[in-house]
Amino acid sequence: MRDRPRPVLAGATALVLVLTAAPAAQATAHPGSARTAGSLVLIGGGLKGNNTEVYGEIIDRAGGSRARIGALTAASVPESQDPHADDPVRCSNSACNGAYYAGLLEKHGAADAQWIAVDLDHIADADSDALVDRINSMSGFFFGGGDQYRYVTTLLHGDRHTDSKVLAAIRARLADGAVVAGTSAGAQIAAGPDMVTGGDSYPALRDGSAPGYFDDPARLGYLLRGGFGFLRSGLVDTHTGAYGREGRALRLAADTGHDRVYALQENSALVVDAPGTPRETMTVLGTNGVGVIDLRDARARTTPAGWTLTRARYTHLTDGDRHDAARGAVHPARDKRPLAPPRHDARARRRRRLLLDRQPGGRPVLLPRHRHRPRLDPGPAHRHHLREVAPLHRHLHQAAGLHRLDERRHHRADPRRTARRHRPPMTPAHTAPEAGAGRTPRPAPATGAGTRLGTGAPQDPKGALMASGTLADDIRLKLGTLSPAERKVARVLLAAYPAAGFETVATIAERATVSAPTVLRFVARLGYSGFPEFQAALRAELNQRNASPLTLYEETEDTSGDDSAAGLMARSSKLFTTAVAQTLAETPPHDLERAVALLSDRKRRITLVGGRFTHLLAQYLALHLMQLRGDVHILPERPVERAAALAGLGRRDVLVVFDYRRYEEDKVALAQLTLERGGKVVVFTDTWLSPTSAHAEVVLPSQVSTPSPYDSLVPTLAVIETVVAGLLTALGDEAHQHMRQTEDVARRSGLV
C-alpha cells in the first residue's frame, strides 16, 4: 500500500459482554501485479468524495493510470421511482448515482469508469452478453450503497439465488486479480451466508433475529443464503460507529453460529487480499477504523432475565492495522507502540490495552508506569475512539433490563484463573425440557392428524411461533451453546435444510470440515441417541409438513375410545379451545401491530389471495376490510384479469396471502413479484410456515389441530377477528364514516 500518515489509535478496548481487548493489526504490502487472486475494498458507508486514501487504493489495485472500473448501483432506486430523476442536482437513483461514482473514480485517477446499467428497471440486462463483454475488459468494480436486497433481486435472480451472467463475469474477474470495492450496501452484499438485511441494535439484542427481509428497524432480519459470498470468513455490517450496529451484529452472529464479525465504520475501509483462501489477510484504511468481533469462544444463553453473551472479544483496528483471518490474529501497524496504564492502576491494566502511535510533536513513547509520574493523555484520537465505541456500550447497557451483561475483567492466561472462570454453558430457558445438561434422548416424533413434532412449541428469539418442534428451530435455538466445531455442523445443515440432514455422517463431516465424531456429538446435543434417530425425526417432520387430508386420514388412529356424538364434541371442544388459545398466545404482538398498520394505511391498496380452501378466509377478511376502508380487492382467478392486476402492483400495494399445507407454488411467485415491485406481503399460514413466509414482512401462523383429517381453520378465523378488531381501533372515525357511506349506498341502490 502507499505511504500514508498514521492516526493515533489502533487499539482494543475491553468490552465484556464479555468483549475483551486484543491488539490491533499491522500493514500489509501491496500485492504486486503477479498476484493470482483479486482483492476486496469494503467501506462502511459515508465515503467522502475527497477520501483520496480509499479511492486511491481502489484505483491502484485496478491498475493505477490504466484502471478501467465499472460502477454498479442497482441497490439504488431506479429512475422510474425517483421523483427528481430529471433534476441533476436533486436526483438520487441508480443512473444518477452511477454517473456520480464514475466521475469520482476518474477524478481520482482511473483511466476509464462507467456505469453498469443493471437495476430494477433493467433486470434482464443482468444476463446481457454485451454487458459481459464490457465487464471482461475491466480491472475493477465498485458497488454503491442503498438496499442490498436490490442486488439480490437484480444480480442473483432473486429467490433463485443464482449468478446472473454479469455477476458470474465479475466473480471470474475477481479470481483473475481484479479488485471489487463496495460501500454500505455494496459492502454488505459481498458477505456470504446470513447477510444482515436490517434492524436496530436494541431490539435485536432483546428479540433476536429471524430470516427474511423486513422494512422495520425493530426486526433484525437476515438472508440465509446471503449475498455474493466474496467474503466468507465472517459477517459484515456497516455504519457501525455512526448507528451503533455492533449490538445487532453480535446477536446475529450468535444466532447463526458465525465466529467473526467485521464491523465497518464510515469513511473507512477493510482491504481484503486473497479473499476466500488460506492466505486471506485484511488491512484497515481510514481514520475511523474497523471493529473485529471474535465469537470463537463465546457462549450465549437465554434465562428468564433475558439473553446473555459472554466471552466475546472486540478488537478495534485503525489505519494500517492488519487482521489474519485464517489464524484470527491481529497485528498493529509497525510504527505503533503499545501503551499500558500506570502500575498502581492494576484494574485498568487488566481491562484494556491501548495502542498509541505517537504523542503530538514527539517520538513514539510508552505510557509511564511509575505511580508518581504524570499519566500521558493519549490524545484526541483516543478520545475519538472511545466516542466511536460508545454506541456499542450504549446499546448494551440500554438492554440491561432484559439482558444481564456479565461484565468480567480480562486476565492474562493463568491456568488457575481459567479453571475457576470457565463454566459449562447454560441452555436457553425457552427450549424444550430435554435440552438441558444430562437430558435423556427424546423419542422419535409421532405423526398423524392433529399431532405436532417435539415436546413443545419452540419460539424464535423474537418470541414468534415457528414450525412446531422443527429440527431447524432446535438447531437455531442451541447455536449459542454449541462448540465451534459443532456450530460448523449446524451451519452446514441449516444452509441446505432439510436435504443436508439426509446425507451420510461422513459427507456432513467433510462439508463442515470436522470429524465424524463431531457430527455424532452434535446430534447427541440435540437429544438424539444416534444419527438414524435424527434422520427418522427429520423424515417424520417432512411427512407432517407435506401431509394431505388423505395422508392424515390414513395415519389417524382414534384412541379416544368414545365414538359417540358427546365424545366427539368433547374432543373438538378441547382441541379447538386449546388451538385458539395457543395461537393467540403465541402470535407475536409486533407482527399483529405491523399487520394492522399496513392494512389500516388508507394510502395502500390491499389485495388478498387464498388457496383451495383458504380462499374463503381471504374473502372473509376482504369483506370486513371493504366495510372499513376503500381500495380492497380479491385477486381475480381468471388468467387475463389476474395478470392485469399483478402488472399494476407497486410500492403502495399490500398482498395478503393465505397459504396452508400443502403449500401452493404460485403463492411464492406472487409474493416475490410484490417484493420486486416494492410492495409488502402479509402471510397467514400454519405453524410449519409456508415457503411464502420467506418473502413476508408479517407472518401470522395458526395452529391447525382438528379431530378430522382436515386442518382446522378455526384458529385462523380467531386471528382474522383479532386483526379486524385492531383495524377498527386504528381507523377510528374513518372506519365509522366509511361504514355509514357504504350502508347509505347499499340502501339507495336497493342492495339491502
Image: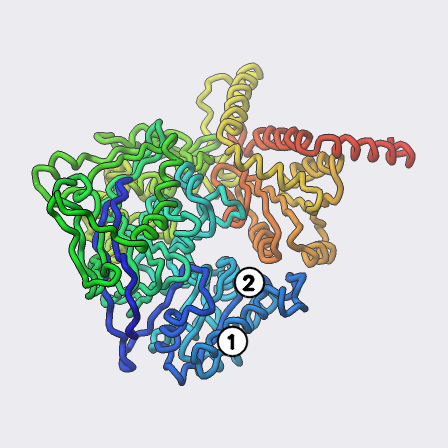
Identify the element where label 2 is drawn. loop
Q: Residues within 10 Å of mark 2 (few under 14, many from 20)?
A: many
According to the image, label 1 marks what residue?
A: 103
The residue at the point 14 percent across, 50 percent down is 368
In this view, 288 is above or below 298:
below
Q: Pick the residue in front: 315 or 76.
A: 315
SS for callout 1 = helix
Q: Measured from the top left, where is residue 597 in percent x and y?
A: 62, 39
Which residue has dot 2 on it?
A: 76
- For the C terminus, the quadrant is top right
- Disc 2 marks which amino acid? Ser
In the rendering, at what x and y percent does residue 244 appear? Answer: 41, 47
Q: Nearer the viewer, mark 1 or mark 2?
A: 1
In the picture provided, is 393 more to the left or to the right than 745?
A: left
Q: Is residue 348 visible?
A: yes
Residue nearest the observer in this picture, 405 or 723: 405
Residue 541 in view here: no
Q: Position of residue 10 (x, y in %)?
A: 26, 57
